[in-house]
């Protein structure tokens, strides 16, 4: 059921944050396992031309995957210039763990594809439910992350009856 997927992703993501940042709290799996599950569940969502309720979690998963990729690349670069030691395993020394790069590339491509549609849609907001518009949050957040802020006006205009007041000006 698609409407439950954002909640499952949020659960995986919160477990990732817990495992990654709180050594004293024991989790069933490693932080890598939780983040990978959150990213892969995000990738397996069916294409949607609406924002999902709780869709901001997609942005957070993307941000964390990209951060972990930077961390892995920095560790690999440091390992490449450091003398060989017993504290570095072969995957760190060779930079072999590129899963974060692959996941980040796929997640970013998916978000760009959805944002491209939203920037041309007359009413790019919505939800997986016919009776609400909880997806507005995701539409706006994804556009901001991708620096497509002018496209956010489409959503704002739809919400505010085609005219909005922003910084003392009326935009039409």
Image (cartoon, grey):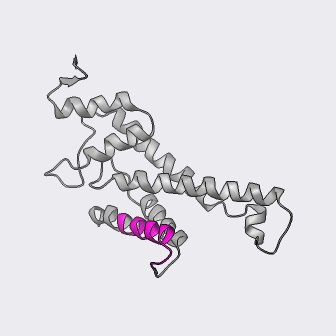
User: Residue 21: image x %, image y %?
Assistant: 48, 67
On-image quarter of the N terminus: bottom left
Nearer the observer, 171 or 89: 89
- Which stretch is magenta? 10-25
Locate residue 20 relative to residue 58 in the image: left or right: right
Q: Residue at x 81, y 75 (%)?
A: 86
User: Residue 133: image x %, image y %?
Assistant: 19, 47
**From the viewer's perspective, is residue 115 above or below residue 39?**
above
On-image quarter of the C terminus: top left
**From the viewer's perspective, is residue 159 above or below residue 13?**
above
Is residue 101 among what the camera can see?
no
Locate residue 140 relative to residue 86 in the image: left or right: left
Is residue 111 among what the camera can see?
yes
Locate residue 95 relative to residue 83 in the image: left or right: left
User: Residue 75: image x %, image y %?
Assistant: 70, 59
As for residue 20 lying within the magenta part, the answer is yes
**From the viewer's perspective, is residue 131 above or below residue 30?**
above
- Residue 148: which quarter of the image? top left
Q: Residue at x 40, y 54 (%)?
A: 58
**Which SS type dominates the magenta stretch?**
helix
């Amino acid at each position: 059921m698609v409407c439950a997927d954002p909640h499952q992703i949020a659960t995986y993501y919160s477990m990732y944050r817990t495992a990654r940042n709180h050594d004293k709290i024991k989790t069933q799996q490693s932080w890598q396992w939780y983040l990978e599950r959150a990213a892969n569940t995000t990738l397996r969502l069916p294409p949607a031309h609406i924002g999902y309720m709780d869709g901001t979690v997609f942005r957070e998963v993307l941000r964390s995957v990209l951060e972990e990729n930077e961390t892995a690349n920095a560790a690999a670069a440091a390992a490449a210039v450091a003398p060989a030691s017993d504290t570095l395993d072969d995957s760190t020394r060779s930079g072999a763990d590129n899963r974060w790069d692959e996941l980040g590339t796929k997640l970013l491509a998916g978000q760009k594809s959805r944002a491209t549609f939203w920037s041309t849609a007359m009413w790019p907001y919505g939800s997986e439910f016919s009776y609400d518009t909880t997806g507005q949050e995701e539409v706006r957040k994804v556009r901001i992350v991708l620096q497509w802020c002018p496209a956010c006006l489409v959503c704002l205009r739809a919400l505010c009856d085609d005219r909005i007041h922003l910084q003392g000006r009326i935009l039409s």
